Amino acid sequence: MVLMVRRAALSLAALALVTLNPVTTPVTAVPVVVDTIVVGDIPVSVAFSPSGDTAYVTNAGSYTVSVIEVSSGNVTDTINVGATPYSVAFTPDGAKAYVVNYGDSTVSVIEVSSGNVTDTINVGEGPYSVAISPNGKKAYVADSADDTVSVITVATGTVTRQIRVGDSPYAVAFSPNGKKAYVANYGETNVSVITVAKNKVTDRIRVGGGPRSVCFSPNGKKAYVTNRNDSTVSAINVAKGKVSDTITVGGDPESVAFNRDGRYAYVTLSSGNTVSVITVATGDVTDTITVGNEPYGVAFSPTENNAWVTNSDDDTVSIISY
């Protein structure tokens, strides 16, 4: 009888310990759209200033750039640029923004402090994408109609070279260390690798059909390429220069971006009005987020846990918190 009482007492004590010290399971934040901002006609691309205070959105249909104050979500200015602006990138010091104008084959250079276009640079035919080197010295422009990359010296605002790449280059991105640039050739099934010091294509990496965009992970070890024609993302091992994984996403993947710590990548799917969330460590699609109509561009804030997505068919930007 005494033994039974002791056992009961021990059981009650154990229950009390469990009650007082419950086992907690880490909670993973679920990404959700928290705000929608109305911008110009046919928004295509979005980019954040290095400080994260301002976002620029290119409006291809209205030939403008919407300037958004990130803290309030308000459009504070609208800047007239060239015809059919597609892509935008800030210089690392945040002083300038480069906007590629597909319709008139130019780049508009915006002085951020004033919001004025201070220069217009002629580049190759049908410029689709722009990237600025990490040291801020060069801008690469993917000229989709003449199969080249225009190299702009930022200090002088002049095109100093045109690099022959593949068929219909749609996107260009610099590696974080600035030594390589990847160019997605939409008319082929490959990525051109440019050695930046030489301004020369030194390799080609085979990917999926219709490579549309490219982005490096923050640590530079991986690059993701969206393949629009086969609804996949090619994960490139940068050190080896080859695809290490092929990830199936939804229909018509357009743009891709990594979050600040590189744990997740977001892919816009224009035909499904959604964003696929890839967990980079496993290469799995772990979430799908419904956004606006025909999402195209995506960019992560450099300071906050959110991503902005341009919805080209309803003239809005969706803000996703994660």
Image: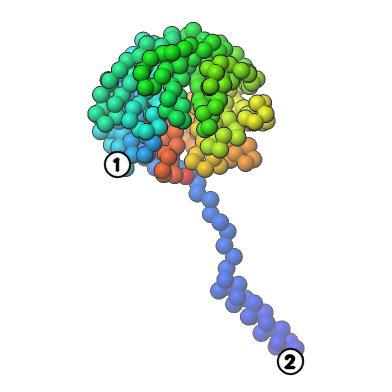
Instruction: State the residue lying farthest toward the bottom.
Output: 2
- Taking the image as shown, residue 193 lies to the left or right of residue 77, namely right
In percent of width and height, residue 46 lies at: 40, 29
Q: Residue at x 39, y 22 (%)?
A: 154
Please give the count of numbered marks on the rendered protein. 2
Distance CA(mark 1)–CA(mark 2): 69 Å
Q: Give the residue displayed 37% in from the left and 22% down from the top.
A: 155
Task: Name the residue carrying label 2.
Answer: 2
Position of residue 247 in the picture relative to residue 123 (left or right)? right
Mark 1 vs mark 2: in front: 1
Q: Is residue 40 visible?
A: no
> Residue beneath label 1, please?
72
| Residue at x 39%, y 36% (from the top left corner) | 50
When asked about the image quadrant of residue 209, the answer is top right
Mark 2 or mark 1, which is nearer the start of the sequence?
Answer: 2
* Left or right placement of residue 19 versus residue 314 in this view: right
